[in-house]
Image (tube, grey):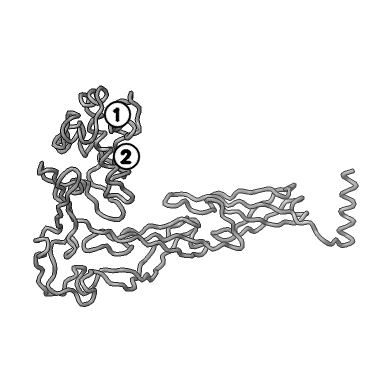
Amino acid sequence: MAKDYYEILGVSKSASDEEIKKAFRKLAHQHHPDKKGGDEAKFKEINEAYQVLSNKEKRTQYDQFGTTFEDAARGGAGFSYQDFARGGAGFSWDDIFGSASPFGRSSRTQQAEGEDFDFGDIGDIFGDIFGLGRSRQRQRRKKRGSDIEMEMQIDFREAVFGTDKVIELYKNIVCPHCSGSGAEPGSKVVSCSTCQGSGQVEQIQSTFLGQMRTVGICPTCQGEGKIAKDKCKKCRGQGYIKDTKKIKIKIPAGIDNGQSIRLSGEGEVGSKGATPGDLYVVIRVKQDPEFERKGNDIYTRQEISFSQAALGDKIQVNTLDGEIMLKIPSGTQSGKIFRLRDKGVPYLQSRGRGDHLVEIIVKTPERLSRKSKQLFEELAEEKD
C-alpha cells in the first residue's frame, strides 16, 4: 500500500522546500530513537518521506507515480540507502542539528545538562553507515559540579552599608590526599585496558539503515583513558570527599532582600578535572523597627506638636548616618514630606545614594489643660 509522504511530514502537497525541511527537523528531533520517548519506526518513516520530498526529481516521480517503502529500498523512487548515507537527498546532519539545534544555538560545542557536550558526538550517534565515512572522535565528557543555593540572613544596616561574612559549608571538596586525581600518591597511572586509552568504547548495531557504529564513554575509566593501579584510600578513586569548608562572602553595600550573590567555583566539585559548580547565596534582610526601605530611599515618620507645626521649629531626626537637625517651617501640615538628599541606601555597585524621606505627623493632644483649652477657643474665635 502506497504511503502518503506529505501526511507523514504533516505538510500540504504545495509545501515549499523550506517548509518540508522545517517539518522534517521538528519530527526528527521529536521521534529520534536515542531520545526519551523516541519512536524508531516513526523516525524511519519520517526519514523515508523526507528522502523523496526533499529532492525535486524524486518528488516529481512520487507525485506522478506514488511509491512504497519497498519500492524506495529497491530504488523505485529514484533513491537508495547509499544516497541517504551520502546525504544525496539534499540534506546533511548539520542541517538537522546545526541551526535547528534543540539547545537553540548553532555553535559546535555547547553545555547541556551539566556536561561538557560536543556536537561532534552526534556523528557518533549515527555512526558509520555502510562503511561510508568515519564518525568524529568523541571528546571526553566530564560532569560539571552541581550548583549550591543557600539563604543568609543579615541585619538591615549590614545590607545598607555592606559587610563581610564567613560561612561553613558541608559539600564535596577536592580530596586533599590525592589532590583530586583519584590515585593513591606514588601509584602508577596506566592506560585503560578496556578502551586501550581512548576513553571510549564502540558498539556495532544493526538498524534499518544497515550497520551503525555507536561510541560511548568507557565504563572502566569513565572516559579518562587512564586508571591508577591503586585508588586513593581517602576518596576511593572519586577525586573528592565530603567535608566542611569555610567560605568568605563579601556582602555589597545596597543589596536588597531576595537578591543573590554568585560565588563562581564555590559549588560542588566536578568529576576529575571538570569545572566546579557555583554557590548562590540568597540574601534575607531583617526588618528595621524604625527605617523602611523602598528601593534606595529610606522612609521614616516624625511626630510634632500643634505649636511646632503652627509656629515652626527645629527637630532632631535620626538617619542611617546618625541624628541631624531638620527645620520645620511655620504652618507645616500633617503628612508633609521632607527630603534629605543622599541620606538613603547606597546604589548597588555604583556611586551615590538614595534619599531619606521624613513624613511629618502633627500630633493631636488627647487631653488639654484649662489654659490650653482657652487658647484654642480664642484661636477658633479668630478663625470665625
Across and down, in percent, residue 287 comes to: 57, 62
Residue found at x 15% / y 50% = 213
Which quadrant would residue 174 be assigned to in this image? bottom left
Q: Nearer the viewer, residue 64 or 249?
A: 64
What is the secondary structure assignment of the residue under circle 1? helix
Residue identified by numbered label 1: 18
Distance from Cα at disc 2 to Cα at disc 1 = 14 Å
Which quadrant would residue 247 be assigned to in this image? bottom left
Q: Residues within 10 Å of mark 2 (few under 14, many from 20)?
A: some
Across and down, in percent, residue 141 comes to: 21, 56
Across and down, in percent, residue 260 comes to: 43, 57
> Is 34 on the left or on the right of 260, as rendered?
left
What is the secondary structure assignment of the residue under circle 2? helix
- Say which amino acid is labelled 1: Glu
Q: Earlier in the sequence, mark 2 or mark 1?
A: 1
Q: Which of 76 and 98 is in front in this view?
A: 76
Furthest toward the front, the residue is 1
Q: Residue 27 got which mark?
A: 2
Q: In which quarter of the image is the C terminus?
A: top right
Q: Residues within 10 Å of mark 1 (few under 14, many from 20)?
A: few
- Circle 2/circle 1 CB separation < 8 Å: no
